[in-house]
Amino acid sequence: MDDFIAARSQMALSLGFHIIFSCIGMIMPFFMAVAHYKWLKSGNIVYKNVTRAWSRGVAIFFATGAVSGTVLSFELGLLWPEFMKHAGPIFGMPFSLEGTAFFIEAIALGFYLYGWDRFNKWFHWFTGVIVGVSGLASGILVVAANAWMNSPAGFDYVNGQYLNIDPIAAMFNDAWFSQALHMILAALTATGFAVAGVHALMILKRKNVLFHTKAFRIAAVFACAGAILQPLSGDISAKDVAKRQPVKLAAMEAHFKTEEKAALILGGIPDEQRDTVHYALKIPGALSFLAHGDFKTSVTGLDAFPREVRPPVAITHYAFQVMVGLGMILLLIAIFYFFMLWRKRKWLERRWLLKLFTAAIPLGFIAVEAGWTVTEVGRQPWIIYGIMRTRDAVTPMPGIVYSFYIFTAVYFSLSIIVILLLYRQVKMVGKLYDVTG
Amino acid sequence: MNFVMLYVVMAYLWASILLYVLMGGADFGAGILEFLSTRKSKDQTRRVMYRAIGPIWEANHMWLIIAIVILFVGFPVIYATVSVYLHIPLTIMLLGIVARGTAFSFRNYDAVRDKMQTVYSKTFMYSSVITPLFLGIIAGSAVSGKIDPQATHFLDAYIFSWLGFFPVSVGIFTVTICGFLAAIFIIGETKTEAERQRFIQKAKHMSLAAIAAAGLVLVAAHQDNIPLVHWLFGNPVSVICVLLAALSLIWMWISLFRQSTQWLRIIAGAQITLLLVAITYEHYPVLINLKDTEGLSLLTHKGSDKTIRSLAVALLAGSVFILPALFYLLYSFNRQEEPVEH
């Protein structure tokens, strides 16, 4: 492994872990605030227990999200100093605002976690809401910064110089909205299904059923709403990518030849040497429709770009298929669940539905990782799309391989501990909280 | 206008570094004190510390993020240079931050109390020492002029830039300062007389350790040919600051014996501030001293005017939200009253 690949792997690893920690840290406060609200309104102690249990999860994930985010803010420079030298002043605006949002989140979390029975109960609840809102804001801002790498704006690039810098224009680049919307819904869906799934599993095991049922219902509604809205945002994203980064769209779809009535390619094994896809299912015209809203319009293929600016097609295509496939599965579960709620069926007795939710625990996060792979690998070989190559941004320091090994070990052990912690939280529900039922 | 905005940004950078040293420092120090406590008193130390630092724990570390964001947005060349030549100590510091932050929250939020607590506590204590040690090393090498952009050999470029007598002694000094700040802070948070006496004792020890470490820094500066004495005594502002800091030591010792906790915090905070003023005054506007060439100046290596302007506005606007909330947080958890029941 050379230093460049090591640097990319370390960045991918750090982001890959941070994204899971921070998605949960960003979305769970909302579940917590809803349960808290229900407790304040109904006085039902079970809701208070659910709130307290979830707040421990939030604390754990906030801490891991915060430290892994700190690592990232340094890694940008440690691994990509040449990139930061030029990009920092241009796309730094969302980061400065994110600093504020994150700070507010940390303060609000201090109030919330340590504020039980100390403050007016609605003030206390409100600090929990602020944790959620500021977390969401920092998520949006960070994605806006990433979107700039896909859709550089707010400067003129003249003879290798970055002139007329406008940080505000850079923040509101063409990609920020579609990317942020897609990411927030993904976080909502993934976290919702993971949380709901854990509680579904406990219901199936008949442990503290009342507690887990209340928790399940809150998480499931969020999860299913996210899963149903996500295809719409996916469509916005696809059209946006088709316009801004046609080469990325072509790689996502393994669409090698520019053509009218372009077919949507499902599955298949892309052959990057021969510019073709084997064993794929093709739906004529569908890609033209998805990319441009019309069955006949021509869709730019990979052949329109020189080989050296094409992203790795196979990885991008597989990741995209995985993301969409899992999204569809979650959508189906969501439709089932809402149908049951609507017809007032006794869903709790439908073990198959609970089993579906249990099986879905990891799916949302796999989809998030796959989607992230599409965004990042699909942008290669560029770090700033069309402006700076990733290879030219890497640190001159040798031996990054070792740094990669160390961080791999750290992140894997962290993940194992976090999973162990969550397992113990769930196992101890009956003992920690005065649960009836 | 642009001129003013640049000063706003620099002021925030300076303030966030200071606040990280003071608040983050007290935070690190809490772990250092736990590390130095006898086995018997470790539990007590931990309990007092959790109560005193828990609520502001997450906020204390935001100052580092603010400082780093200001650097990479406003002064990207400085950020990039430091990232390249101090890659190794920065990485170790980061690992320390990760280990510490997660260990602290894991040990408080693990639902089961078992042997894992020992793992969390050990991780927490060791990383509480390592992180400020490397922070100090980074600060020491930033001013030492050992960073050499012309270096071609791996050792010269990436190892000797930070691994030297002077940076390491600054690291040790930083560790003692953190321990000292924590002890002073916690004295005011103690509930019983015995606890109070214990932390007063710790404050005295850490203060002596810090004075000894400061002596070590002077020796190291002499050995490594670093004009530290000139920085501290070469201009009237630094001289006054150093003298005031030294004089306040006497006042602090009197306060320690008289046990007036509020004054203690103010004096300790003022001492650190004075030291930072003394050392930065001489260097301004240079942030990083380089070997054989001019240092990296905040005035010449700044981002575009528009960037600095938006950064200043973002910082000012952010403060409007952050500062009142932060003060209220500190104030709320500082009141000694018992929690109200609902």
Image (cartoon, coloured by chain):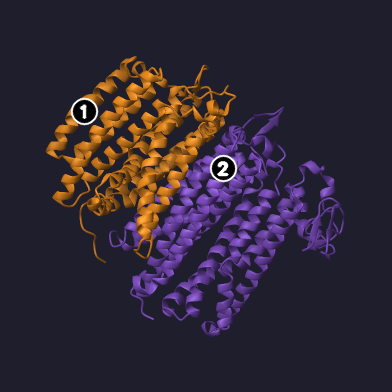
What x and y, as percent, mark residue A97?
50, 43
In the image, residue A329 lies at what x, y percent? 65, 70
Front residue of this view, candidates B156 and B107: B156
Q: Which chain is purple?
A: A
Q: Is residue A141 visible?
A: no
Classify the position of the C terminus of chain A by image quarter.
bottom left
Residue A316's disc number: none
Which residue is situated farthest in the left direction here? B258
Q: Which residue position is annotated with label 2? A: A402
Q: Report, in whole angstroms, how far the alpha carbon at label 2 lies from the one at label 1.
A: 47 Å
Residue nearest the viewer, comparing A435 with B335:
A435
Give the number of the disc on residue B248: 1
Q: Is residue A126 above or below residue A331?
A: above
Q: Colour of chain B?
A: orange
Q: Work out whether residue A248 or residue B39 is closer to the camera in this orientation and state it.
A: B39
Q: Secondary structure at mark 1?
A: helix
